[in-house]
C-alpha cells in the first residue's frame, strides 16, 4: 500500500480521502506532506482566498483503494481519548484557550468528533461553547427523563366517544383554523393526547373558540385547549404548516411594478399543507416548545414526548412551588429568631442602663447623706431662731428624699423595659444580621422583595414589631 510513501504521507493521503475533516491535525505541518503527495500526482492542492483544500486525483484514489484506510479514524480516536481523559481529571469541565493561526486547535471539531466516536457513556453527553474565558467543554449527565423509555400513545383510526374538548373543537365554525383535509386527523391526535393525559391524572379543558388567525399572528393566538398537570396549565395551539414555492410574477404585477416604484413583487407563494404543528404555552420547557410533522416522524409518533413534556412541566412547577414555600418558611424562621435575639438584646441593654442608674443613685445617696450629716451638725449649734427652724424643715425634706434615693439604689429587681418600637429594635436587628424586609408570603411578594426591587424602607410592623 502507498509504495514509496512514509508513514506521515500515508496518514495525510488517508485524511484527504476522508474529505479533509477539521480537527484532525494539531498544526499545519501536514501541508508539507500534502505538497509531497501533490508532486507525486496523488492529490491536488488548491488555495483560494486564503482557504486551503486538497482533493484526491484518480491515481490517488486508486492508491488509496489498494489498502486499509483507517488512519483518520485512529487520529480522531486518539484525540477523543485524550480529551475524555483530560475532562475526567478536571471534574468534567475544561476551559481551552481560543487561538488563531496555523497551529490553532479547532475545539468545536474536537467536540464534534468526540460525539461521533461512540466513546461517550450513554448516560452522559459532551458540550462545547464559546465563553469570555475561552472554549468551554463539559461532560454532563443526561437527565433521567431523557433516558426514560416512553410508551407510545395510540391514535384512534376514527373518532368515537369524543372527549368534551374534542367536541367543542369540532363545533367551531372553522376547526382550529385548519383546512378541511387535515381537520379530522388533527382531532384524532388531540383526542389521543387528551386521553393519555387524563390516564396520568391530568385534566383537559377547552380554551378558545377563536377560528383562524391572521398568518402573521398565528403563533401569538390563544391556545385551542389546555392540559393541567400538577397544578400547572399548559396551553396547546394547533397550526397548519404552509408550503412555500417560488412566486412567478404575472404580467399585471410586472406592469404595476414598472409603473410604481414602491410596489414589491412577492418572492414566494404559500399554500396550506397537510403537515401539523403543536405549540405549547406555559410552564418551564424541557424537551422543546414545538412539535411538528417531520419526514418519517409524524406527530402521532411524537405524542409520547409531548405527553411527557406536559408531565415534566407540571412536576417542575410543583417542585419549584415546594422549594419557594420552604424558602419562605426558612426565611420566616430566620427572621423570628433574629427578632427574638433583637428583643433579648434590647432588654439586656435596658437593664444595663438601669443598673448604671442604680449605681449613680447609690453614689449620689452616699454624698447626699454626708452632706445632710454635716448640715445637721451645723444646725445643732444654732440658737433657737428663724434660721434654725428653716434648717430643721430642710433636714426633714432632705431625709425623706435620701430615703427614697437609697431605696431606688438598693432595690434588687430586674427592670422591665417598655414594649420596643421598630426604631428601638433596628440597631439590634442589624447586629443580628436580620433583614428589615418581611418574609415573602407568595411568589409575587418574593419577586417584589428580591435584591434590587424597589422598597419604601423598613417594613417591620410598628404596632406589632
Image (tube, rainbow, N blue to C red):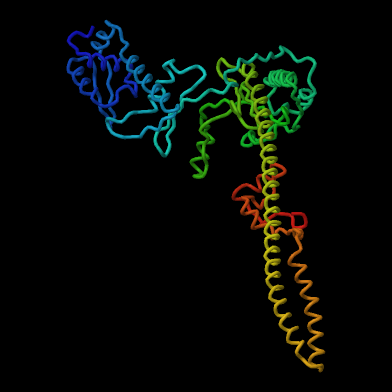
In the rendered view, tell whether residue 246 sits above or below residue 411: above
Please provide percent x and percent y for residue 150: 63, 16
Q: Looking at this view, is 410 or 427 the one in front? A: 410
Looking at this view, is 438 or 194 the one in front? 438
Q: Quadrant of the N terminus?
A: top left
Query: From this viewpoint, is residue 141 visible?
Result: yes
| Side of 197 relative to 19 (left or right) | right
Q: Give the residue drawn at x 70%, y 37%.
A: 325
Splitting the image into 4 quarters, where does residue 357 fall? bottom right
Q: Residue at 79% x, 71% y: name it.
A: 404
Q: Position of residue 29 (x, y in %)?
A: 23, 25
Please indicate whether residue 24 sits to the left or right of residue 5 in the image: right
Left or right, residue 13 beside residue 110: left
311 vs 385, nearest the viewer = 385
Residue at point 62%, 54% (across, down): 430
Residue at point 54%, 27% (across, down): 244
Amino acid at each position: 500500500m502507498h509504495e514509496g510513501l512514509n508513514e506521515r504521507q500515508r496518514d495525510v493521503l488517508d485524511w484527504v480521502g476522508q474529505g479533509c475533516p477539521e480537527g484532525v491535525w494539531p498544526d499545519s505541518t501536514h501541508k508539507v506532506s500534502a505538497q509531497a503527495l501533490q508532486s507525486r500526482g496523488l492529490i491536488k492542492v488548491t488555495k483560494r482566498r486564503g482557504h486551503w483544500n486538497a482533493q484526491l486525483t484518480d491515481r490517488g484514489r486508486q492508491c488509496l483503494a489498494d489498502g486499509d484506510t483507517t488512519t483518520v479514524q485512529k487520529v480522531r480516536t486518539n484525540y477523543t481519548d485524550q480529551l475524555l481523559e483530560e475532562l475526567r481529571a478536571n471534574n468534567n469541565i475544561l476551559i481551552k484557550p481560543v487561538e488563531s493561526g496555523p497551529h490553532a486547535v479547532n475545539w468545536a471539531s474536537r467536540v464534534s468528533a468526540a460525539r461521533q466516536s461512540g466513546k461517550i457513556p450513554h448516560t452522559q453527553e459532551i458540550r462545547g461553547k464559546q465563553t469570555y474565558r475561552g472554549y468551554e467543554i463539559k461532560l454532563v449527565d443526561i437527565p433521567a427523563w431523557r433516558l426514560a423509555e416512553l410508551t407510545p400513545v395510540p391514535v384512534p383510526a376514527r373518532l368515537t366517544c369524543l372527549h368534551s374538548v374534542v367536541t367543542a373543537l369540532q363545533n367551531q365554525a372553522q376547526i382550529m383554523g385548519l383546512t378541511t383535509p387535515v381537520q379530522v386527523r388533527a382531532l384524532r391526535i388531540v383526542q389521543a393526547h387528551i386521553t393519555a393525559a387524563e390516564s396520568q391524572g391530568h385534566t383537559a379543558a377547552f380554551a378558545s373558540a377563536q377560528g383562524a388567525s391572521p398568518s402573521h399572528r398565528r403563533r401569538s393566538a390563544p391556545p385551542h385547549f389546555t392540559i393541567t398537570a400538577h397544578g400547572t396549565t399548559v396551553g396547546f395551539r394547533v397550526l397548519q404548516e404552509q408550503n412555500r414555492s417560488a412566486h412567478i410574477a404575472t404580467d399585471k404585477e410586472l406592469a404595476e411594478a414598472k409603473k410604481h416604484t414602491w410596489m414589491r413583487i412577492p418572492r414566494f407563494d404559500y399554500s396550506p399543507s397537510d403537515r401539523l404543528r403543536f405549540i405549547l404555552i406555559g410552564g418551564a420547557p424541557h424537551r422543546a416548545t414545538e412539535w411538528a410533522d417531520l419526514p418519517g416522524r409524524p406527530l402521532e409518533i411524537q405524542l409520547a414526548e409531548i405527553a411527557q413534556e406536559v408531565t415534566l412541566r407540571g412536576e417542575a412547577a410543583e417542585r419549584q412551588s415546594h422549594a419557594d414555600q420552604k424558602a419562605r418558611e426558612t426565611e420566616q424562621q430566620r427572621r423570628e429568631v433574629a427578632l427574638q435575639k433583637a428583643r433579648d438584646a434590647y432588654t439586656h441593654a435596658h437593664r444595663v442602663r438601669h443598673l448604671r442608674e442604680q449605681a449613680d443613685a447609690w453614689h449620689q445617696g452616699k454624698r447626699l447623706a454626708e452632706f445632710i450629716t454635716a448640715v445637721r451638725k451645723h444646725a445643732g449649734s444654732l440658737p433657737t431662731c428663724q434660721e434654725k427652724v428653716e434648717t430643721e424643715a430642710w433636714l426633714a425634706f432632705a431625709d425623706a428624699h435620701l430615703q427614697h434615693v437609697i431605696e431606688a439604689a438598693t432595690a434588687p429587681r430586674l427592670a422591665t423595659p417598655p414594649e420596643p418600637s421598630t426604631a428601638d429594635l433596628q440597631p439590634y436587628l442589624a447586629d443580628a444580621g436580620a433583614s428589615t424586609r418581611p418574609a415573602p408570603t407568595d411568589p409575587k411578594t418574593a419577586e417584589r422583595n428580591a435584591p434590587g426591587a424597589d422598597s419604601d424602607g423598613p417594613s417591620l410592623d410598628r404596632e406589632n414589631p
